[in-house]
DNA sequence: ATTGTTAGTGTGTTTAGAACACTAAGTCAA
DNA sequence: TTGACTTAGTGTTCTAAACACACTAACAAT
């Protein structure tokens, strides 16, 4: 294949790290490759960027095609451009990470695809290409960002208990949190709206359900409020 | 030009936002374009990525060729991939930002290039392509990151006074800082090494010069210390 | 020697974070 | 129906960090 272009070109892909939360366990969706190179190995969902779609559009398309999820939180992570990262030829990959709520988008939606499966984020098998590096970067970003932007809610169902929220933060911050201090602080921010519902089908006292009030967050942000946990 | 490749390809460029600090004024280096498109307009230094260099290498090469600077702090910022961002054809650009110390790398080194000039970061002319957007993103990143990583030192000479450092933070945080509280906090971190030198050629009491102790920072980081200002 | 300019220094107050333990509500099974 | 089990929900005290604040010291220039 000879280069007919004025400037040398690299093939361009997007790869997505899709996180989900399953009972206090942080999960990542992986796809088992069918084609060479790395046939049979697990890899992040992703693929080539088309000439008439933006990078964000490509990432959403791949998430929809390969993982069966749509309308999720999505953010660009980093662009990986080592010369030898793909054994075939020069391929530059723009990595994204996405957050999905496993309670509403249940596991089966994605596992229907049969070659996709959820793994605990810190117990993944050996991955194709430099995907292990991408996953590490995504975990670092998620664990860092969850502190100063209210993105964690994207991993929870629309209505959740304060304990679920606390467990999420315990997973991300990798340390136990005091229940009373946590509730005082998070309720004090005024970002949670109490619903009139409570947890169902639990073998103990049922907890109140809350919603994240995104509109209120936008208002407060304009007035200089900054989220911090 | 027809596409002979299996996958559609975009041309790939890097663009660099090079920051410098001039007496408490944050500056950006721009290059006046000689070629179409946008001939005559100011733009960020940058250019096409070669097939056998990494993205970081491409960014450093462009900084060296177009801005005459080497061995500077450099970090990937974001990848811009809107379909119409270049009027000629699809071009995806990996943006970087870099920090240079204008006192040691004096202005002339770069202005020798004649088509390069420093502008105050918040008074730039109209820029080519989507470079205004890239600059905005770089400023936001710099102003955010300077709080929790000691990267500001990259903008200062090796030996600096506490007042210089304070002014740097006042520019980045966009608010005045109390002198006594600032000194207490920054010296309390133990990251500054007092030198035995003082400021020269000033028409008032000369201030002591300090160095940033990068080794000490690495040590402390391992022990869980986190920089915060 | 007087003026101008920046360097350098300490204390009290306020605020936010950290530590900590019991009662309430509900399910389940004997 | 009672007792055992599980998680929900709730305040106060202590501690550490942030904040507000004003004067003297050193040096150069005239």
Image (cartoon, coloured by chain):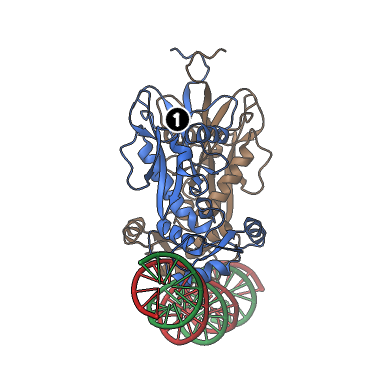
Chain colours: A brown, B blue, C red, D green
Q: Position of residue B211 (x, y in %)?
A: 59, 59
Mark 1: give few (<14), some (14-19) or many (20+) Cα within 10 Å: many
The answer to whether residue A103 is above or below residue B70 is below
Per the image, label 1 sits on a secondary structure element best described as: strand
Circle 1 residue? B92
Q: Position of residue B64 (x, y in %)?
A: 53, 34
Does residue A201 appear in the picture of this structure?
no
Q: Front-most of C4 and A20?
A: C4
Q: Position of residue B40 (x, y in %)?
A: 33, 28
Q: Front-most of A86 and A35?
A: A86
Does residue A78 appear in the picture of this structure?
yes
The chain containing the residue under callout 1 comes to: B
Q: Position of residue A126 (x, y in %)?
A: 69, 38
Q: Front-most of B181 and B131?
A: B181
The answer to whether residue B42 is above or below residue B223 is above
Q: Please tell me how many numbered marks the rendered image carries.
A: 1
Residue at screen point 43% across, 39% down: A70
Residue A136 falls in which quadrant of the image? top right
Quadrant of image for the N terminus of chain B: top left
Residue at screen point 60% across, 59% down: A174
């Amino acid at each position: 294949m000879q280069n007919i272009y004025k400037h040398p070109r690299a093939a361009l892909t997007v790869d997505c790290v899709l996180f989900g939360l399953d009972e206090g366990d942080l999960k990542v969706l992986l796809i088992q490759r069918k084609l060479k190179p790395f046939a049979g190995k697990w890899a992040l969902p992703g693929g080539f960027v088309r000439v008439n779609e933006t990078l964000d559009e490509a990432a959403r398309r791949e998430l929809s095609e390969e993982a069966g999820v749509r309308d999720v939180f999505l953010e660009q992570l980093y662009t990986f451009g080592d010369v030898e990262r793909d054994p075939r030829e020069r391929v530059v990959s723009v990595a994204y990470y996405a957050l999905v709520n496993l309670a509403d988008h249940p596991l089966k939606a994605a596992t229907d695809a049969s070659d996709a499966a959820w793994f605990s984020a810190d117990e993944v098998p050996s991955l194709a290409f430099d995907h292990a590096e991408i996953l590490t970067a995504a975990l670092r970003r998620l664990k860092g960002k969850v502190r100063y932007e209210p993105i964690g809610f994207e991993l929870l169902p629309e209505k959740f208990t304060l304990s679920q929220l606390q467990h999420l933060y315990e997973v991300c911050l990798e340390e136990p949190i005091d229940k009373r201090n946590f509730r005082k602080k998070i309720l004090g921010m005024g970002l949670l709206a109490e619903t009139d519902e409570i947890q169902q089908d639990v073998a103990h006292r049922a907890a109140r359900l809350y919603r994240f009030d995104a509109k209120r967050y936008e208002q407060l942000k304009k007035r200089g409020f900054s989220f911090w946990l």
